[in-house]
Image (spheres, rainbow, N blue to C red):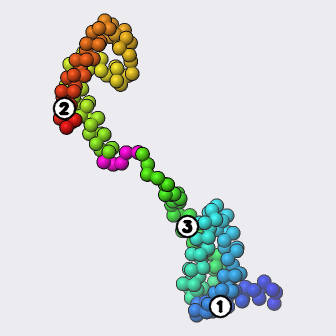
Amino acid sequence: MSVAVATAESDSRLIERVAGGDRDAFTELYCRFARPVFAMAVRQLGDNGRAEEAAQETFAAVWRSARSYRPERGSASAWLYAVARHAIIDRARQRREPVVEVPDEATAEAGPEEQAEGAWLAWRVHSALEQLPERERAVLELAYWSGLSQAEIASYLDVPLGTVKTRTRTGLARLAGLLDEVRA
């Protein structure tokens, strides 16, 4: 009898003993197969942490299902590697969750309440702006949304600079009146 056949038979016998709840047999089986199972998992998953989890799941499954091993169907190592393959496939199907670190201090970003308040205020300003006469609204939009200076607005609209200043002042005053209720 060759050494490989003797080892295969002893692996088979170990699994039978594990099926009977023999912890020493399980430890021996683990010592023989932990490294190759882990190496197989690393090759398949490409991540040591996930490979360790797959190897742990493999041996947990071996402990739970050792009674399902049938020597007439194949070698003990083939059965154990099939169990490992299933554990690795299951681990590969699971989503990778990025590691999230807890921040050292609170963020300065607005929370949900502040964002909702800001969105409501922006909606209110746009609604009030739509109520202004077109000439005043156009001047305010060019100044505040397009970032043009009053001289650039005068050139763009082809009106005197004084007219732009008057429309801006009048438009802002009307807008303030429409938004009085928001400031309260």
Left or right? Give the position of 139 relative to 63. left
Spot the residue most to the right: 2
Mark 1 residue element: helix
Q: Do the residues labelled 1 and 3 touch (CB within 8 Å)?
A: no
Q: Is residue 85 above or below residue 60?
A: above
Q: Which amino acid does label 3 sit on?
A: Arg
Which residue is label 3 attached to? 91
User: Secondary structure of the magenta portion, mostly?
Assistant: loop
Residue 116 falls in which quadrant of the image? top left
Q: Distance between the residues labelled 1 and 3?
A: 28 Å
Which residue is label 1 attached to? 24
Left or right? Give the position of 152 relative to 16. left
Residue at 61 percent of width and 73 percent of height = 55
Which residue is label 2 attached to? 180
Left or right? Give the position of 126 relative to 35. left
Residue segment shown in magenta? 109-113
